[in-house]
Amino acid sequence: MPEITMNGSTVEVVPDESVLDVARRQGVFIPTLCHHAGLGAYGACRLCLVEVESGFRPGLTASCALPALDGLVVDTDSPMVREGRKLVAELLLARAPNAPEIRSLASSLGVTGTDLSTKDETCILCGRCVRACKALGLEAVSFAFRGSKRKVMSPFDRTSETCIACQACVTVCPTGAVTSKITPDAVEMVEWHTRQELHRCPSCGKRFVTPRMQTRLHQMTPDDQHARTSLCPSCRRRDTAGDQTSAVLFK
Amino acid sequence: MMRIRTREDLSDLAREGMQRLTVALPRLSVGMSSCGLAAGAGELFDVLQADVGSDARLVRTGCLGFCGAEPLVEVNLPEKGRVLYGPVSETLAVKLAAEVQAGRFAMENVLGSLDPLVGETRMVDHFPPLTEHPFYSRQVKRVSRNLGQIDPLSLEEYAARGGYAALFQVLEQMSPEEVIEEVKQSGLRGRGGAGFPTGLKWEITRQAADAPRYLIMNGDEGDPGAYMDRSLMEGDPHAIIEGMIIGAYAVGAETGILYVRAEYPLAIERLSGAMEQAREAGLLGGDILGAELRFNLHLVRGAGAFVSGEETAMINALENRIAEPDPRPPYPAERGLNGRPTCINNVETWANVPLIIREGTKAFRRYGSTGSKGTKLFCLVGDVARSGLVEVPLGASLNTIVNEIGGGARDGLQVKAVQTGGPSGGCIPTDRFDLPADYEHLQGAGSIMGSGGLVVLSEKTCMVDVARYFLDFTRHESCGKCTPCREGTEHLGDILDRVTSGKGSEKDLDRLVQLSEGIKRTSLCGLGQTAPNPVLTSIEHFRSEYEAHVHEGRCPAGVCTALLTYSIDPERCTGCGLCSKECPSEAITGLKKEAHVLDAGKCIKCGACREVCAFDAVRIQ
């Protein structure tokens, strides 16, 4: 079994684990922001920095993207790590000084203010929305421009042709920068300039799904399930429960 | 073009090339790389063509290195030898043509006589050899040996200079493992800047996983002032292609990609042309040289982002994604393009490969320092007297390169420092010019070798302004993916803007150092990890300049406009009125033949008055 040394203790690791995975398993706290368990390693925010002492290039590295290589020796709370994370927190705070999540994150790392020039952004460019959209096979939003001009946009910052208004981006956004407005008959994705009507459930008549989302659901499910994916969640649950009862009792 | 299958075929080709190089007719070679063309070589070529007609053969060659003396023209007279001229004006071109028709060499602007290219041609004895010219005397032409000497698009001439012999040697006598061992033994390290051992990279790629494996030539050279790779691609494309075919055999790759930045149209044209010739000659494709080797090359144009020179960003670009770096590991050698083992080497690295095979590791290791073997191309630019592309053994001192080869600063100015490694490197002051230019020593001095750009900075340069210039470059080229590089370089830029406009404080200097060190340690890729180097090194070596800006509101070099005040010295002013005519903001007034007065309130500090004044009467404080 391969092993790594974390903060002086030896830990057995399984293949394909990251150092962050190992730390979480061991109950060792490492702050993260761009990391999302469902979205794969990205290594952009740099909050999860750890110090590699040996076994890989020594110095600071993002633990979310660092494979737990056999023989690796890391420190998750060295002075260099704390300084590095504080710098990242301060830079994020200067970017989004009024975002409550960033303020509390920064203050938990000992950063309560900054003398750097500040902006008033909410988006901290962690890319979770972009990656979630891509994971759904849509890529309705992406990064545009580079450097400090970087931002997340629908193509040309206009109404998106591909957004299905599923709101996965809203769900994964850590700072509330991506927003949606839901009314009884439509969903509006504010930042992506996209408004979509809600269609009715063929069973109970409640408005619940956008037509594009329904199409996507059809694409993702086997043909014999299409009728079920047109149902609203309550009707679908009822329908599925009927199926499963028979499955458990009679097979 | 005939297909090359045997050594005899290659010899035939080489013989043909030799005839072209040792012609019965006079041969006029015009240096027509981008540098030559910018200096007017294209027009010159037309003048020569019109004048010599069919009495001589005109050839477009690559860059002979001495960019400061462009346009360069070489005259090769049958039975007499070769002489290099530069700079050649249109008037001189007409004269050269007339003399050539009379079978003579012109006497003006001779840089020197050249060694025979091939065979037993005599050296011209009444001109000093070019190798004694101060720009060339300390150089060792190895990887640049063909630049400016041969027609880059002549497979025959490349063969006459020993081209593709190394490929034969490899295919006939060596196993892939032996080739890798040979490259490892040579000590060749990546010429793109990081200096990773090339043979080791090849070995990792070969052992990482089964085929398909890929090779990539990184031709995304983007440092301001660096054009080593461009010169190689424009001047000797076949050397790169031969290096890659040898690499393909060693690594076990069937596909190679030439990634060239779109801003290098001539390099793209010459590489494409050479690729086509290689394909026709059976050097690319299937059954290369009759051996069981299949290798194809594709050229891809980069779409103008400095960061796509970073290998993982380049792979993203090649896979139709945004050119942004990914965390490593996995390294491309293990999992690169399309998830397959991919060996990415810089242009100059590939071009060194045929040389190593043909001449052996011993000849290669003869040059260089302990940890850095071979020779390296550098681009000597900035405030230098003799600018150009130079090749020296790794470990040659900065003094040799800047002062002996470059002739120190231009126009009698004093050299203050040299910036190595472009925006990712740092400045090195003159009192450290004994420093050997190799990977270890430059890194030890807080700079990097980078791909080889050397920007000479004179006393007229403000070090704070230079740091700001390079930082401006990196902050605009940062992809913005990771927080420290995106946000941090912007703050560094803001603080430097403050300092150069006289609004900085001592605290800002400490903040610059603290931010810089943090960005270096925490950034995702090499761009952010090196971007603060210009700031850190300039503060380390020229702190007094920074202090003059923040404490005295003064720019000692007289560069930072916000800190300058223009005035006219009444003692020196003759009242000629030229400055007031030139002034775009009507800030200068005065009667004819009487001392003029400059209204500092109206002055926009453009410096136009200072430029036109013949009496040095415009003062800046």
Image: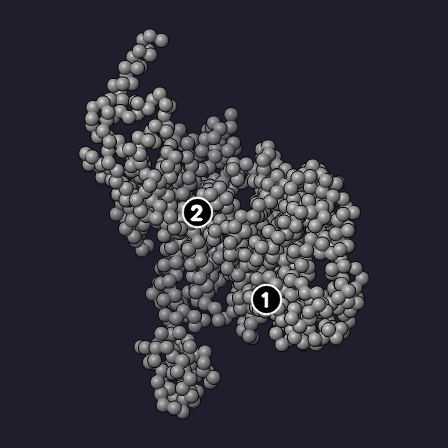
Residue at (54, 56) in percent of width and height: B264
Residue B523: which disc? 2
Q: Amino acid at mark 1?
A: Gly
| Alpha carbon distance from label 2 to label 1 | 45 Å
Residue at (62, 68) in percent of width and height: B46
Residue B257 relative to residue B366: left or right: left
Q: Label 2: how many residues lie within 10 Å, few (<14), some (14-19) or many (20+)?
A: many
> In this picture, is A10 found above or below B479?
above
Image x and y of residue B199, in percent: 64, 43
Residue at (44, 37) in percent of width and height: A65
Q: Nearer the viewer, residue B247 or A61?
A: B247
> In this picture, is B39 found above or below A27?
below
Name the secondary structure under disc 1.
helix
Residue B33 relative to residue B548: left or right: right
Q: Amino acid at mark 2?
A: Ser
Q: Return the chain for callout 2.
A: B
Q: Label 1: how many residues lie within 10 Å, few (<14), some (14-19) or many (20+)?
A: some
